[in-house]
Amino acid sequence: MDATSQRFLMCRPTYFAVDYAINPWMDPTAPVDTALAIRQWEQLRRTYLDLGHTVELIDPVAGLPDMVFAANGGTVIGDRAMAVQFRDPQRADEAPAYRAWFEAAGFEVYDPKHVNEGEGDVLLVGDHLLAGTGFRTAHASHAQLQEVFGHPVVTLQLVDPRFYHLDTALTVLDERTVAYLPEAFSPGSRAVLRRLFPDAVHATMADAEVLGLNAVGDGRHVVLPAQATGLAAKLRDRGYQTIGVDLSELRKAGGGPKCCTLRLRQGKASQ
Ligand code: ARG
């Protein structure tokens, strides 16, 4: 399998904390070690650089503890970026910060008309955009995504609050294949996934509960939480090279490697 060189956007967790609870993983009374979170995040960034990927950085903003989760900053395909609108007021101010970054980087920016949490809920597989709804991104925004990007949008209904963003329940492995947790989707959406991806890797609840599906693939390597050992073994059986990273501190906010990583598909490196 060929690895495609990727360009990512990340945000250092300088101001990371769990000050509020907007998903079931977050417990504001539990201690968080911000210095450890930064070291773990640096390890993720180093992993991407070692794989030959490019990592762009956006400046973190004080008072926005979840800004480290760059996947929620937008949806980017080619030279177009769709900005985001968060469901929760605690994250609202991240949207203009990411929007400004896209503008400065030269993207053509589109503003969301409805709640849309970016690549947390919107994943490109080949020509299809898979779009999650049920907890965060509004169903109405899926139509706008299709208009902005001109890729067919496939709506997927998420049903388990622990897997509140699509990228906690499904991983894109390459242009044709995904891995996912069937139980995280409604019966109709499971049927859609079976139809589109008959060869998909099915993850177990044990893997999903350590956010194992919050992984980043480049077609050949898959960077995933080190704790997701069962999923890693299945992926290796399929010929992928797996690289485990420990993001235990960020998991206290409900995030893993993919949440920290926004794909910037632009120019020749685009997939
Ligand atoms: N605490 C953040 C939230 O609830 C975590 C976001 C994780 N991001 C993701 N792409 N799944 O919004």
Image (cartoon, helix red, strand yellow):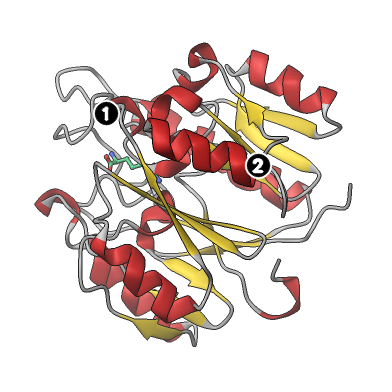
Dots 2, 1 in contact, CB < 8 A: no
Toward which corner of the image does residue 177 lie, by quadrant?
top right
- Determine whether, in the image, residue 232 is placed left or right of residue 111: right
Toward which corner of the image does residue 185 lie, by quadrant?
top left
Quick one: quadrant of the C terminus?
bottom right
> Which residue is the site of mark 1?
161
Structural distance between the alpha carbons of marks 2 and 1: 24 Å
Which of the two labelled residues, at mark 2 and mark 1, occupies the earlier sequence position? Answer: 1
Q: Quadrant of ligand 1?
A: top left
Of the numbered discs in the image, which one, if any, rests on residue 197? Answer: 2
Q: How many marks are shown on the rendered structure?
A: 2
Name the residue at 71% across, 52% down. Answer: 49
Q: Secondary structure at mark 1?
A: helix
Name the residue at 86% across, 32% down. Answer: 239
* Front residue of 204 and 193: 193
* Front residue of 171 and 73: 171
Q: Is residue 103 above or below residue 241?
A: below
Q: Is residue 81 above or below residue 58?
A: below
Q: Say whether residue 244 is visible.
A: yes
- Determine whether, in the image, residue 74 is placed left or right of residue 253: right
Foreground mark, 2 or 1, reads: 2
Is label 1's Cβ within 8 Å of ligand 1?
no
Of the numbered discs in the image, which one, if any, rests on residue 172? Answer: none
Image coords of residue 13 (percent x, y)? 38, 45
Image coords of residue 244 (percent x, y)? 66, 27
Toward which corner of the image does residue 58 lie, by quadrant?
bottom left
Name the residue at 89% across, 47% down. Answer: 1
Name the residue at 75% across, 78% down. Answer: 268
Q: Amino acid at mark 1?
A: Pro
- Determine whether, in the image, residue 223 is placed left or right of residue 148: right
Q: Secondary structure at mark 2?
A: loop
Q: Is residue 19 above or below residue 146?
A: above
